[in-house]
Image (spheres, coloured by chain):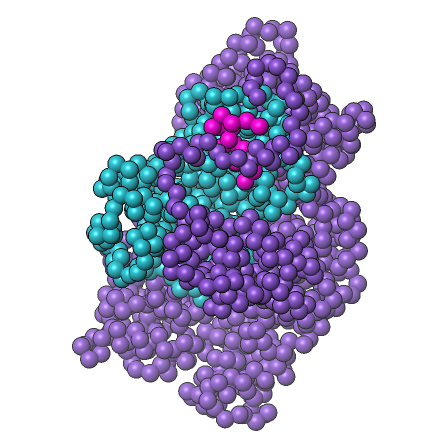
Chain colours: A cyan, B purple
Amino acid sequence: MPLTGQQITSLAQVFTDHWDLPKLIEFANDLDFNLNNEAPVGSVKERAIQFISKMNSSLPPRDRELLEELSRRGNQALQRVAREMLAPTFYSPSPNNDPHHAILLGKAAFVDRANLRHIMTEFTQPTPFTTRILIIRGEQPGGKSYSWEYLRHLAVSSVGATPQRLRLENKDYTPRQLLEQVVLLLGLDTSGMPQMTDDPQLARIDPLINWFKGKLPTLKQAYWLVIDDLNAESVTPAMRETAYAIAYSAEEIKSNLWVALLGYNTPITDPELRFIAREDAQFPDAKLVAQHFECIARGSPMPLTLKRAQEIANLLFSKFPTIDKGSMIELTLLIEKMGEMLRAGQQP
Amino acid sequence: MSESGESQRTLTLEELDRFLALPNQAEAEPTELPAGDTGMLNPTPWLDAAAVLAAFDPFLLQPAPGSSDRQERERLLDHLLPLCEQIIDGPQRGLWSLSFSERRAALKRLATRERMQSALDANPARPNMPAQRMFERVVDGEPIELARLSRDELAGLSTVVDWTVGILDNLPEKAVIRLALAGVDLRAPMQRLAGQGFVNRQQELEQLEQYVFGEKPQVPLFVFGPGGVGKSTILARFILEHLEVRKVPFSYIDIDRPTVRPDHPLTLLLEIVVQLHLQMDLPTNATEVLINETTYGMGRVEVGRGLEAYNAGYGLTYYISLFKDLLHNAVKGNLTVVVFLDTFEEAQFLGPDVVGLLLDFLFHLNQALPTFRVILSGRALPREFMSKAFHNLSDMASKWGLEHELSLERIPLPERPIDLGVLDEGPARELLQNSLQVAGLAPLAENELDDVIGIVGRNPMCLKLAARLLRDEGVEKLRAARSDLLVKLKAEKIQALLYGRILHHVHGDDVRKVAYPGLIVRRIAPDVIREVLAKPCGLTLTVERSEYDIFEDLAKEAALVERDPLDGSLRHRADVRRAMLEDLTDHVKADVVQQIDRAAVAFYSKQSGAIPRAEEIYHRLRLRQKTKTLNNHWSPETAERLKGAGEELPAQQRLWLATKLGVTLDQTVRQTASQEAWEDQVARTANRFLQAGAADRALTVLHERTWRLPRSPLYSLEAEAYRFLGELDEAIRVSQAGVEALSKAGAIDMALDLQLKMVIIEETRGDLQVAEKLLAEAKAIATHSHNELLRLRVQITALRLQRQLRPDARDERMALRRDALADLTDEILHRLRFQPVLLREVAAELSNEDTRIVRTAIDTLGLEVVTDAQAQALARALTTLNTLHASANMSDPVLSRAVEQFEQTNFDPGAIRNWVTTDLTTANTRKLGQSLIMSVPQSEVNRDFQTYFRAGVENALRGQATS
């Protein structure tokens, strides 16, 4: 969660194919969503898109609620789509289909990251000593957002936790606003949240955090909260410190909350936190991508030699003499496309 | 083409491109979700329109060029939304944004500023977002002056540069934007502080100027004064007006921040490095390495095994020297660098031992480079600072009181601590006159101003309160308060007196009573007035005049009380309230005070939550209730809210609270403590000293009393202190006494720990037979212990001794190893990370058998090269690992380069150490641990790492650090 643009349009299409407008209105009504008020005009599909989009961007998000309801009340086709979206498909080359070793998350390629896979076994099989904080570092774009896909996948397929992602890029939150978003994502009540005394809010966040710590024991279900984009330039030091303090609270209180900070590059200086889980995200090199291709093809009707896989990977990388943000994104799309083809048994 | 064994033709890039352009067969399968019909839609104008918008509503988006066709909307959504991301939080929630790659592709297509402007024109209603505004300015083509941009505009510009780099020209460099952002972030707290009611402090600013830019001072400069006097403000002004204009790099650290720990001074060093990194353009890799070394250094500390932990590290001076080298190597050593440390009282709160160790660090730092300047700021001038900086004056200071002007005046400028409690005459007059104006009074004549200043002094807070009093009483009444006593009082006491006088002018009898003696309670709320204060304070609550009316009237007295943001209650100014409480019993009957405290306990004990619990504990402490009662009601969540309460309490209660808060108190208070409280305090203090290698100071504290409780934690600390000082016989004597006493008292684990200490003492002095004999006794004690880690320590010590005593008895060793490995579960391995000294010892004995141990040890301890033997053993282990990687076609370039260097220098320890301290980042270290897991086969690597860890244990036990 949240739903992607592709998922929203696909789901709207399935609504259109299987339900008429009155049925959609009734379903929305049962979710306290008045379709006639919120999306009064347009085709069934347009109105379905508005319905899903608004559920997706509610605070707290209601996309999960929509899918769960659909998986109970929809016809067979709707139920299938809803369930698939609730528990995304993955491909793991390990013999027992271990979700930790997944290399395809839906269509997204999840290459290498052996260290992250290793440390995530601690999150999914926790002991009383297990840390509640995962920090994924990385200055350049290099797979941090794919980390979210992986964490979301593990939360759902391994532990049944609710994954929530808070993106911070270009958000310009004050510490209080940031915490408020977190509290809403966790389905907690924001009333009683203290007002801040310093303006602009810089670092005196103790009252906020103490209040938050008091709320944590009331979390009834497990949440994996992923605070993303912490390395983005738009993220202020105050936002970063607030995110850090939120994670620290999870470690201190040990409730139902697990926190991952993506792009948090500030050194962890607190000795109490020296054993939290940490990973350095890097864009994979051609060798790792070759191994990835070989692994995918292994599970297809047409296996691929590592030599050939290396040749393909080298050619893909040769298209981008310098690896910057733009080229990484384009290269990733090509790697994903190649992965899909190989999985379907197609080879160049 | 398949994996059929036949040789495959080499693929070309053109062939690969053609292949990737083919449709995916799987997508064509009917089981896939049905896609919408996009056949007739030309999406380009829509994508172009979306590409120039930071966010948009897909139902309102207009194409560029062209106009929207109602019929097209559905097909557009089908095509466009999968290429976009919905914004699900923040002010633009619900809108959509084109994905980065699609945006870049569209902008490439648009290519020019003119065409982008046309695309913008298609959607005149655009989102008010910094990235949108900056995109439009970039498209506009006018030069952008970074210095004039706000923080969010700079961040928005950075995003826009990502969108348009390589497409548009004349864009600012990302690195320059990043630098500008770092500058804004650093200045933000300064600008906020500098704007808060600053009164002219010219003399102090001049002293700061002289201190920073004059001759190298020998000691840090301390700026002190009561709360609200403007310490942070003057520092902020100095930074903005004196440092910024000259581009002098600085680091400003507020100890109150969550990432800084005054009891761990290295956290300050890390904060300084992070802040200076961008300002001084320090090389990123070298900075990362320093951070790596320092964080791992902190992680090697193990409470209870002080000497081994200390020997394995380098101490503060080593890390400061690394920092110095970083600046030197970056040719930044000649730049003046100013380090500000604000809110020093937070360190003082933790105890004199913390202050002492922190000052050691800061003095070292000040001396590290001729260009370094360290400026500290806090509410009170610490005694520890005075005796360290001006030891010949410290006697006088203690005689006259630390902040007495007479003693300070003997210190030459510019090192003389700056007392911000007192304004100069001119600024004092100015402030008083301004405050009178705020109070709605006519201006006073010069002589009248001087008269008032003569009475209340030149403390800014006193002057503000005096203005308030003048409004209520007039100048004559104030004159009547003049006395020699008043002149001698500390500023806060004068404030308290003035405050008290103002309280008497609070409108309404009932409000006045709630304020005084109601200030016995720290928190005032309507229900507190009703349930706690009404009866003892003689209030009559009616429908017409209820507790709510009184509360609201008191809330209007903004000079006296402030609202607590947590629960909306009212609180008195803490420092002044404290001073007033001291005199309370002179004016209020003791039984009234007790009634209020009892009512408060009764009231809060019925409620749940951190606030009621903290207030309940506070009043129980005031009532001097028994330790057992207090313990029964204690809850850790209350700690934060009781932080400042200690100073209001009698010594015994202060000690109890200090223990709960984890703080230490000075010797005077300790002397009055019960044996249990004293031991608790001393254990904490001695531990801190031992971790910093200050064994003599630890011993001084431990010797304050010679008697010990039967289960005293001090035996172990005293023995450890003697070990540090090399007085091993004394260490054995104390340990023996401890084992005897602790065993008798049934404290098995403590006795076992001490017994093992004796084993190590004999081992380090080479008497292995005696060590083994003592270990046999330890084994006997261990059979009664349930502590798995202590039992593991016995097994590992046995292995180490056996290896040295009977190197040829392999079968015996194998059996010992088997036993130890059997106990080494995942959970134990996890817990070992919190005992780094034991972990190193385990790795030294068992690495060969289990790769998990090597990885955990490297993850936890980092790479240690204190001795030459360690450095060389490490290099050999890395060489073996690199060979294995190469044979498995898994070479790591960082490792390969390192090994090449080692071999070229014939495993010179200096070169190896140089690699660790200049090339090895945290990420590299973690990657190394990870690659160990992947290496197959591992036995050879494991054996080499075992040798390396053994060199580490050797050093930890015997402290043979290289020069």
Residue B238 in the image: above or below residue A261? below
Choose between A38 and B953: the one closer to the eye. Answer: A38
In the visual, does B262 lie left or right of A106? Answer: right
> A339 and B740: which one is in front?
A339
**Residue B422 can be seen in this image:** yes
Q: Residue at x 71, y 43 (%)?
A: B286
Determine which quarter of the picture holds residue B409. Answer: bottom right
Q: Is residue A337 magenta?
A: yes
Apparent side of residue B577 relative to residue B873 in the rendered image (left or right): left
Residue most toward the front? B40
Q: Position of residue A188 (x, y in %)?
A: 32, 52
Q: Nearer the viewer, residue A25 or B739?
A: A25
Residue drawn at x 57%, y 73% is B195
On the picture, is A67 further left or further right than B54?
A: left
Q: Nearer the viewer, residue B530 or B134?
A: B134
Specify the principal SS of the magenta part.
helix
Quarter of the picture containing the N terminus of chain B is top right
Question: Residue B627 at x, y = what percent?
Answer: 35, 47
Q: Quadrant of residue A285?
A: top right
**For residue A35, side relative to residue B75 (left or right):** left
Residue B758 is situated, as x and y percent measured from the top left of the image, at 57, 24
Across and down, in percent, residue B262 comes to 57, 51
State the extent of the magenta-drawn residues as a range.
A333-348
Q: Residue at x 65, y 22 (%)?
A: B9
